[in-house]
Amino acid sequence: MLGTFPPSSFTDPTLIPGVTVIRGVHINNLRAAVNTLQTDAGLLASTWTDTLTAGSARVRTAHITELRAALNAVYTACGQTPPAYTTPR
């Protein structure tokens, strides 16, 4: 079964679509959460393509794609169907 993370696990516990600016720290928070889920599911934690540090990198589509792929592996390892993702415009 997949675990859950309390809002205190994230830098900004409330993100509002269309209002909140996505920052590297948000991706890093998600990466840490997904790595924890991977470990809990008996998988190796992901190695991400790049490191996001404050002011040095932009959030890219590849970051989201990597997170989705890693999370899909967790669902599969837990015997669950991965979610269907949508990409808002």
Image (cartoon, grey):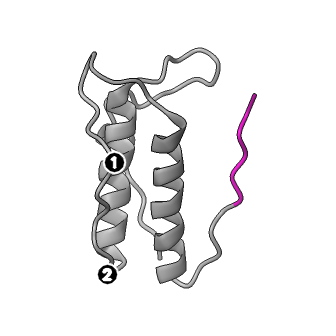
Q: CA distance from mark 2 to mark 1?
A: 22 Å
Residue 73 in the image, given as x and y percentages of width and height: 48, 72
Magenta segment's dominant SS is loop
Does residue 62 show up magenta in the picture? Answer: no
Is 23 on the left or on the right of 62, as rendered?
Answer: left
Residue 5 in the image, given as x and y percentages of width and height: 38, 52
Tell me which numbered mark, 2 or 1, is placed earlier along the sequence: 2
Is 10 on the left or on the right of 53, as rendered?
Answer: right
Q: Which residue is mark 2?
A: 42
Q: Nearer the viewer, residue 11 or 67?
A: 67
Q: Residue at x 63, y 25 (%)?
A: 17
Residue 89 occupies which quadrant of the picture? top right
In the depicted structure, whether residue 1 falls above or below residue 7: below
Q: Which residues are magenta?
A: 84-89
Q: Which residue is mark 1?
A: 49
Q: Residue at x 25, y 21 (%)?
A: 54
Residue 6 visible in rendering? no
